[in-house]
Image (cartoon, helix red, strand yellow):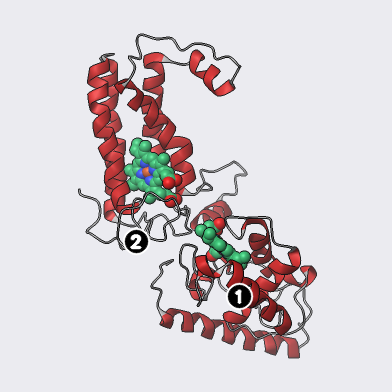
Amino acid sequence: MRRKGFSPAGIRCAFAVAATLWAVVGLFSITGLAGQARQVTAAGSYSAAQATRGKTLYSDQCVACHGEMLEGVVGPPLSGSDFLVDFGGHPVADVVQKIQSTMPQQAPGTLTRAQATDLTAYILQFNKYPGGPDLTDATATQFTLPGGGATPAAAAAAVNTSGLPTVTATANLAQFMRAVTFPNANIIFNTQLYDPGKEKPKMPIPYDYVLWGKTVYYGWEAVDEAILALRDTSPMLLLPGRRCQNGRPVPIQNADFQQAVKNLVAFTDELWKAAQTRNQETVSDLSEKLNDTCANCHKVYRDVSASGGASTGSLTADRCNANPKGGGVAQ
Ligand code: HEC
Ligand code: HEC
C-alpha cells in the first residue's frame, strides 16, 4: 500500500527478499548462468560512484516530493515494497526511463540520461542492493527488479488473449475526472444559467472545433447525452489499477468510496427523469444535488491536505488516502 506511514517492518521484509534473491542468483552464477540476458535482481547493477552522484541530485531535485528516507511525501515512496509494487518484475531500465521522461514532476525532460541513471543507482543503493560495475543502458535492460509487481490492469491485459482492446485504467483519477466527469457534469450544471430548449449556440468566430461541436449537438439532447455519459462512465471510477495524481492507488476497496460512486450512478436515473420533463427549473434544481454527489466524495478523498486542512491544490499527499481522517463519505 502506498501510504506515507508505511511500516519499516514491511521494508525490512522486502530487503530480506531482495537479499535472498541475490544469494540465489549468486548460486546460479557459480553454475555458469551469469551473463544471461535477464537476471532477476538489481544486485551488482550499479556502481558506488553513480549512487554518490545520484544522492546529490536526489537531495537537490527529488527530496521535497519523495522524502529523506525515500518514504514518499507528495510523490510515492521509492523504497521497500511500495517501490516494488510498480517496478517489481521490471527491468531497471524502466526506472531510468520513468525518471528521465517524467521527473522531476514540475520539470520533466530536464534530466540527462546519465543523471537519470545516477538517480536510479542511488535508489537501488538506498534499497540495499549491493553495487558492482557501472549501470549502463545495456545492463539496465538485463537486470530485473524482484517481485511480481503486476498491476491489476497489467494482469487483466495479460489474461486477455483475444487481441481485442479491454477497458483499462490508463488515466490517473484527476485526468479521468477532468476529461470525462467534469465536462459532462458542466453540461448539466449549465441548466442553472441557460434553458437548453431556448438557445441554439452560435458558430464561433474565429473557428474552434470544440465550440463548433456545441453548435451541432446542443439543447436537451446534449443534456440527455451528458447524463448517459455520466451513467456509463462513472463505474469506471472503481476499475482496478487506477492511481491518483499523487501516485496513490484509487481507494476502490473502501466501502464509502464505492458508495459515493453508487450514489453518483443512481443519481443519473433521477437526472434522466428530470431531463425528460424538458423543464429548465426542474433540472437546474436537481443539478444542485449533483454537485453534492460530487462534493461528498471530494471532501473526504480530494479536498484534503496532509496537515488536515481543506485544500484544493491538485498535488496533495493526502488525496486518495485509504484511511481518511474524519470518518469517510457520509452514506
Ligand atoms: C513536485 C513533486 C515531485 C518531484 C520534485 C519529483 N517527483 Fe517523482 N513523483 C512525483 C509524483 C506525484 C509521482 C507519482 C506520479 C507518477 O508516477 O508520475 C512520482 C513518481 C516517481 C517515480 C515512480 C514511482 C512509482 O513507484 O511508480 C519515480 C521513480 C520518481 N518519481 C523519481 C523521482 C526522482 C528521481 C526525482 C528527482 C529528479 C523526482 N521523482 C522528483 C512527484 C515528484
Ligand atoms: C467516488 C469519489 C468521487 C466522486 C463521486 C467524484 N469525484 Fe471528482 N475526484 C475525486 C478524487 C479522489 C479526485 C482527485 C484525483 C487525483 O488527485 O488524482 C477528484 C478530482 C476531480 C477533478 C480534478 C481536480 C484537480 O484538482 O485536478 C475534477 C474536475 C472533479 N473531480 C470533478 C468531479 C465532478 C464534477 C463530480 C461529480 C459529477 C465528481 N468529480 C465526482 C473523487 C470523486
Question: Splitting the image into four quadrants, where does ligand 1 fall?
Answer: bottom right
Given residues 107 and 7, the one toward you in this image is 107
> Where in the figure is residue 182, as x and y percent of width and height?
41, 35
> Where in the figure is residue 275, as x and y percent of width and height?
29, 19
Secondary structure beneath dot 2 equals: loop
> Where in the figure is residue 327, as x and y percent of width and height?
22, 58
The residue sitting at 45% across, 55% down in the picture is 315
Secondary structure beneath dot 1 equals: helix
> Where in the figure is residue 90, as x and y percent of width and height?
63, 66
Judge the density around disc 2: few (<14), some (14-19), many (≥20) Cα neighbours within 10 Å: many
Quadrant of the drawing holding the N terminus? bottom left
Asked whether residue 146 appears in the rendered view, the answer is yes
Pointer 2: what residue?
322
The residue sitting at 45% across, 48% down in the picture is 173
Precedes in sequence: disc 2 or disc 1: 1
The disc at residue 123 is 1
Asked if the residue at label 2 sits under 8 Å from ligand 2, the reply is no
